[in-house]
Amino acid sequence: MHDFHTHFIPAEVLTWLKDNQQIVNAKWVKEAGNKEEFLVVNEKWGFELKKLFIDDQLFLAEQEKAGVVHSLVSPVPQLFMYDFPVEITTDIAIVYNHALARWSSQSEPERISALGTVPLNEPGKAAQILHQAMNLGLKGAIIGPGHAGHMLSDDFFTPLFEEANRLNAILFIHPLLCDDPRLKRRMMPNLIGVPWETTVCATDILLSGLIDQYPNVKILFAHGGGFLPYQIGRLNKGYEQWPLVSNKLKAPPSEYLSRFWYDTVLWNQDSLDFLVKTVGADRVVPGSDFPFDLCVWPPEGKYRKRVQLMLD
């Protein structure tokens, strides 16, 4: 099987973090004796720096043990660095992209493909970095669901989408933790905040008509598309009632669902079956979110009818 949703941190990126530790306020914190150190950047979303994140041979061994024959590897969202000046965001993107390109093209081309990261805080520069990354052999980029109040459908991001469309790039939209103050308890920023951020982004992209404007961009939504597939009937009803919903679309919202891609990171077979029934099995690709704590391991492998189309 393939795994379209995995994360890794090459040694070159760890070196960059240590060299720029004060600039990005990076900290390695020991929280419990039975866990590895937690990596925290700029006092935000920390995570356990498991050996699986940083040991390429261990990463590959675990994939092989699970029956995964090919992994699409992405940078970790905690290292997007969108909150820093574009020079910093660009610098780490270049280091990250070159490292993943070397690993995927020189070391393990049969077992690894990779996505890059781009400075989403400056879309013109993001377009340049995407171009460079794909020239290195990367398949596209993992990006957040927006930045600084800008939704991905805003004109602000036009340079990035124009370049992604020209390159037939994958744009893997991966949420960050939701900062709604109501969720600051019981791990809700992760449990429901993460899929909520995907839902907002995916709904905005769908209703904006962006996919008609840039039909060659392969948009992949993390975590099964959030809550969008489950609420598509409500969007269809809004399409019938309100011009503000329908005026950018050429068809009802439900007909656009099969033009995106979705991973299988849902942890529930009934939810996954509903997703497949709603969007089509050929638009669902196996994914795990490996090696984060909430990964689905091993990934669901039977949804792979058009896996190669995504990677070509």
Image (tube, grey):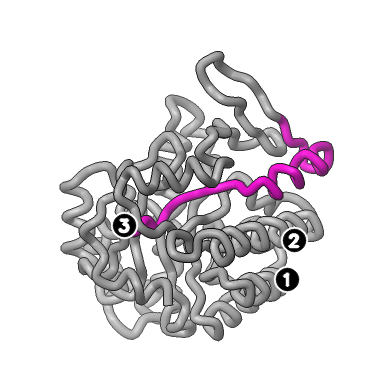
Q: CA distance from mark 1 to mark 3?
A: 31 Å
| Labels 1 and 2 touching (C-beta < 8 A) | yes
Query: Which residue position holds label 1?
Result: 125
Looking at the image, which residue is at 36% across and 76% down?
309
- In the picture, the quarter occupied by the C terminus is bottom left
Q: Please give the range of residues in magenta.
A: 1-27
Residue 62 in the image: state x and y as whole percent. Answer: 40, 42
* Residue type of the residue flagged with mark 3: Pro
Question: Quarter of the image holding residue 5?
Answer: bottom left
Say which label, 3 or 2, has the lower sequence index.
2
Q: Earlier in the sequence, mark 1 or mark 3?
A: 1
- Check if residue 24 falls in the magenta segment: yes
Nearest to the observer: residue 55 or residue 49: 55
| Circle 1: element type | helix
Q: Which residue is mark 3?
A: 286
Q: Secondary structure at mark 3?
A: loop
SS state under label 2: helix
Q: Amino acid at mark 1?
A: Lys
